[in-house]
Image (cartoon, rainbow, N blue to C red):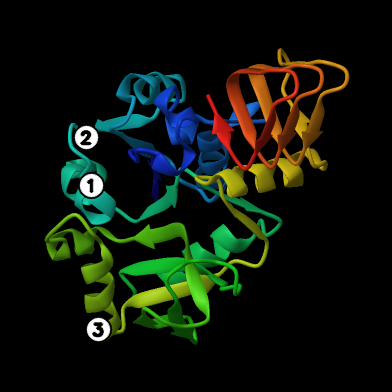
Amino acid sequence: MKGFLLAAGLGTRLLPMTRHVPKALVPLMDRVLADYGLGLLYGAGATEIGINAHHLTSQIRTFGKSKSLVVFEEPEILGTGGYLLGLGAFFDEEMLVVNGDALFFDDGEFAGRLVHRHRNSHNLITLVLMRRPDSLDATGIDAENGQVIGLGSGDFFFTGCQIVSPEIVSMVKGPSIVPVYRELIKAGKLGAEMFHGNWFDCGTRSGLLAVHRYVAGQDGFIYPGARVEPGAIIQNSVVYGEGIVWAGAILNDSILFRGEIEPGVTVEGEILA
């Protein structure tokens, strides 16, 4: 089985941070988001891993080289299905795919279950799903008995991890993979495996803050190199190494990637970079 990390997105939900760093390379503690995805892929048994790149390509290329990944550059974004058409001989066997901003914790067996379900079925794609909380703005998915039976409504949502078989390449007709999903549902070949741990969409401010709270075990995190003056107030926020928060400033529910917050200034619900 091969692996693939999707990292070509523009990261618009994390602007202006992603003007400086691709979303997949946003730091999380002593690693970057992509490292967590690579850990999942290698842990599941992927023997060779690819990564796609579009936004700030040189940074992804350097990261990929440092990790011995096969880098597929996209001068134009090819989309959730279109990228498969450009993989050529790389996509010659089952491939475990994960979004670069999707992080999975506390259900270490799910990848093994996913591989087992896919290989012991007639499915050409098997999605990793979770039960959909009311607060999540995500497309609903109907699934039962290990099969996806409908898109657009339902109790589950797609986590950004899936196994795809190379036979689907001929079914991809455009940038989106959703038409392929719909075709496979009709054929009874779109599988589903459930994830039961803690999942984070780190491509949003709230998701990136939440995963910091989870991993660090505290409401605010200050990276080495950052300067936070006594008298500054940091609440449910992250200050990266190039950030400065002066005495009397308040940072709440926000991310300071670089720059400074002057004394007496209150920042709430923002990303600063």
- x 81%, y 22%: residue: 248
Q: Give, as a three-letter code, the residue at label 1.
A: Tyr
Give the Cα separation between the discs numbered 3 and 1.
Answer: 23 Å
Characterize the local packing of mark 1: few (<14), some (14-19) or many (20 or more) Cα atoms within 10 angstroms. many
Please tell me which of labels 1 and 2 falls first in the chain: 2
Q: Give, as a three-letter code, the residue at label 3.
A: Ala
Q: Disc 3 on helix, strand or loop? A: helix
Describe residue 104's horizontal placement relative to residue 84 as left or right.
Answer: right
- Residue at image mark 3: 187
Q: Give, as a three-letter code, the residue at label 2.
A: Glu
Q: Is there CB contact under 8 Å for labels 1 and 2?
A: yes
Give the mark toward the camera: 3 or 1.
1
Closest to the observer: 28 or 34? 28
Q: Position of residue 44 (x, y in %)?
A: 53, 51
**Residue 141 picture quarter:** bottom left
- Residue at image mark 1: 83
Characterize the local packing of mark 3: few (<14), some (14-19) or many (20 or more) Cα atoms within 10 angstroms. few
Residue 145 visible? The answer is yes
Q: Position of residue 223 (x, y in %)?
A: 72, 22
Q: Where is residue 208 in the image (x, y as percent from the top left)?
A: 60, 43
